[in-house]
């Protein structure tokens, strides 16, 4: 695996690709945004003028794109990106894609002699920068083992989740649990504050009590209580991941009533605040009278 193509040099993709460069790998990146390409060059990476050029001769192609539709179009669309890969190449989709779509894409790539691993991440920009991401990898065990050194350059906790698509399923379900916890924490603070409790004190108590969750620990004090709403993860992306989780539940015939309600709530917030709003701004949406 002498050459890696990395497609998507955004808030998460740039530090992830940079970690691969720091680990000694030859990485050629592409992003349609010029400033993203320039930033990767400054980080020591090489850049190409197109996804097709980046993929030329690559043994591994990593995608970090907005969704599964973008991944499919990039790989199998008119650009013919996968046709430029080296023989026996591996595609690693680290985007937050829909798991059923991932399975269909993997079957199509298989006919072209290309193996696929779905390896979405959790941990945000901070953990992408220091290489401590959690990575959920789905696919054939042999293929995951082949690319594991690359995953270890980007993440600290690498989980083999099972067959192709299970990584993306786990990521969507993780974000569902995370989003539900954030809504509960925000509503609890709003009720408690109205009653006369100090919100910072509430966060401290929650974090040593049974209500503790990721949102109480890392989102309330820096982003929610001061209303900075600047975690770096958009409301639109969270709403998309929740829809992915809910669609999976429906496709599998699982009742998942709270999943339906949560996905609908976040889609309503997206309509009200816009997809680019920070996901912690759900607090401002919840504060509005109904």
Image (spheres, grey):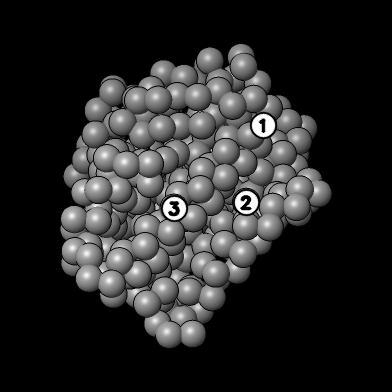
Q: Which disc, if any, is residue 245? A: 2
Residue under numbered circle 3: 181
Q: Is residue 7 above or below residue 56?
A: below
The percent position of residue 183, horizontal first and vertical second, equals 43, 61
Image side of residue 187 versus residue 170, left or right: left
Which tag is nearer the camera, tag 3 or tag 1? 3
SS class of the residue under badge 3? helix
Q: Which of the two labelled residues, at mark 1 and mark 2, occupies the earlier sequence position?
A: 1
Residue at 35% across / 69% down in the picture? 191
Mark 3 / mark 1, whichever is N-terminal: 1
Q: Residue at x 51, y 48 (%)?
A: 177
Q: Nearer the viewer, residue 21 or 53?
A: 21
Dot 2 or dot 3: first in sequence order is 3
Label 2 secondary element: helix
Q: Give the residue at the far front of this rendering.
A: 195
Residue 78 visible at all: no
Q: Position of residue 135 (x, y in %)?
A: 45, 32
SS of the residue at dot 1?
A: loop
Query: Could you say where residue 20 lies in the image, as x and y percent from the top left?
Result: 33, 30
Mark 1 neighbour class, 10 Å CA radius: few under 14, some 14 to 19, many 20 or more: many
- Residue at the spot of label 1: 164
């Amino acid at each position: 695996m002498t050459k890696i193509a990395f497609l998507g040099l955004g808030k998460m993709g740039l530090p992830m690709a940079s970690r691969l460069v720091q680990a000694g790998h030859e990485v050629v990146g592409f992003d349609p945004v010029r400033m993203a390409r320039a930033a990767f060059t400054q980080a020591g990476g090489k850049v190409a003028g197109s996804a097709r050029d980046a993929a030329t001769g690559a043994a591994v192609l990593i995608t970090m794109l907005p969704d599964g539709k973008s991944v499919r179009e990039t790989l199998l669309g008119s650009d013919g990106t996968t046709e430029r890969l080296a023989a026996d190449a591996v595609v690693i989709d680290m985007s937050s894609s829909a798991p059923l779509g991932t399975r269909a894409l993997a079957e199509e790539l298989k006919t072209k002699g290309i193996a696929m691993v779905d390896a979405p991440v959790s941990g945000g920009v901070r953990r992408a920068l220091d290489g401590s991401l959690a990575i959920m990898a789905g696919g054939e065990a042999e293929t995951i083992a082949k690319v594991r050194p690359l995953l270890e350059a980007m993440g600290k906790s690498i989980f083999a989740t099972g067959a192709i698509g299970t990584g993306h399923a786990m990521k969507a379900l993780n974000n569902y649990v995370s989003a539900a916890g954030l809504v509960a924490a925000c509503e609890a603070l709003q009720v408690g504050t109205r009653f006369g409790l100090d919100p910072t004190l509430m966060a401290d108590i929650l974090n040593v009590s049974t209500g503790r969750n990721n949102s109480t620990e890392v989102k309330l004090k820096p982003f929610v209580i001061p209303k900075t709403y600047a975690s770096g993860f958009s409301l639109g992306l969270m709403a998309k991941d929740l829809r992915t989780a809910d669609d999976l539940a429906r496709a599998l015939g699982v009742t998942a009533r709270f999943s339906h309600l949560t996905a609908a709530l976040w889609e309503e917030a997206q309509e009200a605040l816009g997809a680019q709003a920070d996901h912690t701004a759900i607090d401002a949406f919840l504060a509005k009278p109904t």
